[in-house]
Amino acid sequence: MNHDALKAALARLAHNYQWTWNTSCRLLLEDLPGSTPSQHPMETVLGLSREVLARLTSDRAFISRVESELEQLDSLRTRLPDPKIAYCSPEFGLASVLPQYAGGLGVLAGDHLKTASDLELDLVGVGLFYREGVFRQRIEDGQQVEGYELLDPLKVGGIDTDLVVEIPFPGRNVSARVWRFDVGRVPLILLDTNLETNNEHDRAITDRLYDGSREHRLEQEWVLGVGGAIALDSLGWAVEVHHLNEGHAGFITFPLIDRTIENSSLTTAIDEVRKGLVFTTHTPVPAGIDRFDRHIVEPYLQIWADKWALGIDEVWAMGQDPDEDSKFNMAALCLRTSRTANGVSLLHGEVSRKLFAGVGIGDDIISVTNGVHARTWTADHVEHVFDDRLGPTWDTGDPGAWEAVSGIDDALLSSIRLQSSQQLTEMVRDQTGSEIDPDTLFVGFARRFAPYKRANLILRNPDLLEELVSDTHRPVHFVFAGKAHPTDDNGKRLVAELVEATKNGPAAGHVTFLPDYNMRSARTLVQGVDVWLNNPIRPREASGTSGEKAVLNGVLNASIRDGWWDEMYDGSNGWEIVRSELEDAEDRDVEESQSVLTTLLSIANEYHDTHAIFLGRIRHAWRTLGPRVVSARMLREYQADIYKI
């Protein structure tokens, strides 16, 4: 293998995001000279000098590793039929070096694609390429500050399809380049309006994720839905099912209707489109639904009204909000045009049927509980033990495989947990300079800092908090991480409050806040803490997959009975935080803060005084939850109950 052949081979491996769950491939790319955790391996490969390549080509062991990984990749991509399912989402979380995600919705979407590759499902992802991605978080004077970095798609694994689509906008067309990102055997296409043929305003449509005015949000969703359908058609893919991951891609309905409305009524055309349209809702509260004022969205709808020779009111009715006639409701649009809709946990399904009662198929919403991609989120050393002791099917959700966790004795389990804790303490030291004993009970809380998630709940009862953290014989340390949306002042106040708690108050010295939470730091957190804390206002946590990632790594959940935990908690595979029945929000939070801290006091006693019982609880959690929290289980349910192809 000469210099050019080696560089081309490494580029092939770096292009395909299968390295995010293929441990041997990831380690190979990490071993490249110049590799850093914050840099995409494609950029590392592009920066290899001829001198470095010459040294690598003379290393037979290294070349053998490259050839082995290429063989695996070629085997993975042997059968690549045209996709039959299009999974449409405003964000995709594949890796921290491709910051096209803001939270759980995007990480779930990334896990969905990876699992589709594992299960050989003929699926394509459809989204937007945000040139500045999502913001980087800095803490300055105790406050969150946002910053952005420009992304070059070619340096983060993007492949130019040479396709540019024209998307109808009010009074003009907007051009979008179609980039392809390979996720194992699954393609992900992302639309990018940063083209010289567009005016300055239109070039900025796909600039940042979830940042800008309502008009900007509408423009992005128009490109995602309308442009996404045009791109799929231009690529020659005869998609049979379009899956809308939340209502953001709902405008795809219009170009789909346009294909079939000729010589028929709008109602008949919608009935035809409905056969291949499915919708997943992720919000249990009205505030989480995208709604646009009529004066903003009507010019866009007028494009289709004119084309179909219909009155604007007939098109408007497709998405008219059931409670406010002057609002266009994206969830309502999806529910009125889809054949199936689902929530993302059993409890969320119940809540959604009430929330959307009488709106399209809102009364018939079913549930598919979210899961997580096992090999993306499980620590390398834990994955090795699972492969050795449980066999190769543990990541598929095979209950029989998970029964074998009984063979992981206390000594091996303690070794696994200590190695994970040491990796966490190293990350804390590197980011904050703090040294923490790995034998400490680590409690983790890391997620988007939306007010309903109540990141500050432990601070509501300072006396009980001080009792918990001041016991030198049973040390406890909290690790917090998360971002608030740039326009969410309440969320930013939560960040500031947690940062302040690391310096002053009863928890000072026992709380760490890690800035700029991303998928890389999330892996270390869900692997390294001992207890994963979740205390949302029930039932506002639709699913909450971070706790599922923790499960795979032998981390126990302590949570309000909400989202996935409500249906999977059995009394022994973690802890329930008893919720308050008080109606007053202030009184409820105080009572639930006491419940959180009382539960953690009990956990600290078990962890430090009866550690064998704690280890047994981990094995029980693995046995009862392992088969259920993986995305392979989730996707099989989508195949059987939603896609049906």
Image (cartoon, helix red, strand yellow):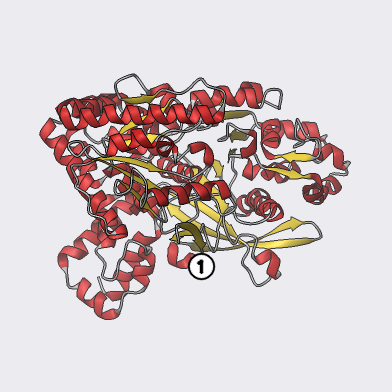
Q: Is residue 357 left or right of residue 621?
A: right
Picture coordinates of residue 542 (x, y %)? Answer: 51, 32
Q: Residue at x 33, y 27 (%)?
A: 599
Q: Nearer the viewer, residue 252 or 560?
A: 560
Residue farthest bottom in this picture:
51
Picture coordinates of residue 116 (x, y %)? Answer: 43, 41
Q: Which residue is mark 1?
A: 150
Picture coordinates of residue 83 (x, y %)? Answer: 52, 44
Picture coordinates of residue 616 (x, y %)? Answer: 20, 25
**Is residue 105 in view from this perspective?**
yes
Quadrant of residue 203 within the rendered picture: bottom right
Q: Nearer the viewer, residue 480 or 155?
A: 480
Depicted 455 relative to depicted 164: above or below:
above
Q: Is residue 296 left or right of residue 423?
A: right
The N terminus appears in which quarter of the rendering?
bottom left
Depicted 520 relative to depicted 439: above or below:
below
- Say few, some or many: other residues with alpha carbon within 10 Å of mark 1 (under 14 / 14 to 19 / 20 or more): few
Q: How many marks?
A: 1
Residue farthest left in this picture:
411
**Is residue 405 in view from this perspective?**
no
Q: Amino acid at mark 1?
A: Leu
